[in-house]
Image (cartoon, rainbow, N blue to C red):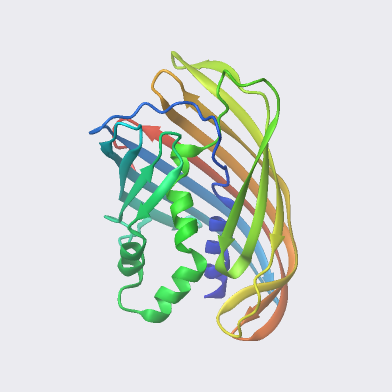
Amino acid sequence: MFRRTLASALILFAVVGVARSDNPLAWKLNKGDTFYVEEATTMRLTMVIGAEKENVNQRMSIVSKMTVMQRFADGSLVVEQEIVGAKQAEGGQPPVSIDAMNGVKFQMTFDRAMKLTRFDGYEDLVKKITGDNAEAAAEFRKNMPAQEAAARASEPFNLFVRDANDPIGPWTRKRDLTVGPLGKADMTLTFRDAESIHETGRELSRATFTGEVDHRFAVAQGGGFQVTGGKLMFPNTSGTVLFDRAAGRLDRLELSVQMKGDLTFSIGGVEMTGAVDATVGQTIRLHNTRPAN
């Protein structure tokens, strides 16, 4: 159980760490617009706990339908996200549907700068995934608090891409990450000069970035599974963001994160030592029609 908990936490801890821009490229969205966001995540993990060593290869894909419910005169928007397909696979096994996630809906309100101002649907998500199991609900809230769920759900709308009218040069943005058993981290991303590229007949704005992570372990609470000490390092965090200026939408995000370290685990209040070496990759793509999942 703790192996799966750690693997899931590493995926959640690594993916989507790009913060909002003060001057993002302008989205062009109107009431009634619909499109799809496809998230594909892979993880390769080698883990040693005590005398046990395991290799874990996981793949997860989530497809969401996005619908612009309202557009107000001040430029603010209400967008509904509905998860229409979620699958997970381990090793060489075929993907299995994550039925508990299908049909989950969020409503997100953005101001004219695409900053999230309201997020609805978190409690429905907890209920759908954990049912009436109060212990499971508490564990879910610890691993994925409402603030983190809101940040991740809204991320495709406010990924940092510098406006072409901004001065040319590197810039940085920060993002706070929280995942229960792994604690918290401050991620600082440094973006390189944006450039225009042509791809499949379109002109895209492309920015690359690298990241540094300052990790803080959770405080042991005497039960369950937690990483409580040691040194978790992030030797390589890098990625690319592409924005379709003509369409007024994100085209895709590509992200790779490496993590390794010698760690101390608390499992049911018992301290154990071990090590992890993981690589997590994520791609987010926008589609006009529902992609195969």
- Counting from the top left corner in percent of width and height, residue 173 is at 64, 40
Looking at this view, is 37 or 121 the one in front?
121
Write down the quadrant of residue 88 in the picture. bottom left
- Counting from the top left corner in percent of width and height, residue 127 is at 32, 69
Looking at this view, is 161 or 64 the one in front?
161
Q: In this view, does 151 lie to the left or right of 259?
A: left
Q: Can residue 93 be seen in this view?
A: no
Write down the quadrant of residue 216 in the picture. bottom right
Residue sitting at x 60%, y 27%: 207
- Counting from the top left corner in percent of width and height, residue 1 is at 52, 75
Looking at this view, is 116 or 198 the one in front?
116
Whether 35 is drawn above or below 148: the answer is above
Q: Can residue 56 be seen in this view?
A: yes
Q: Given the current orientation, which residue lies at the most extreme front position?
A: 74
Whether 51 is drawn above or below 153: the answer is below
The C terminus: image quadrant: top left
Write down the quadrant of residue 167 in the picture. top right
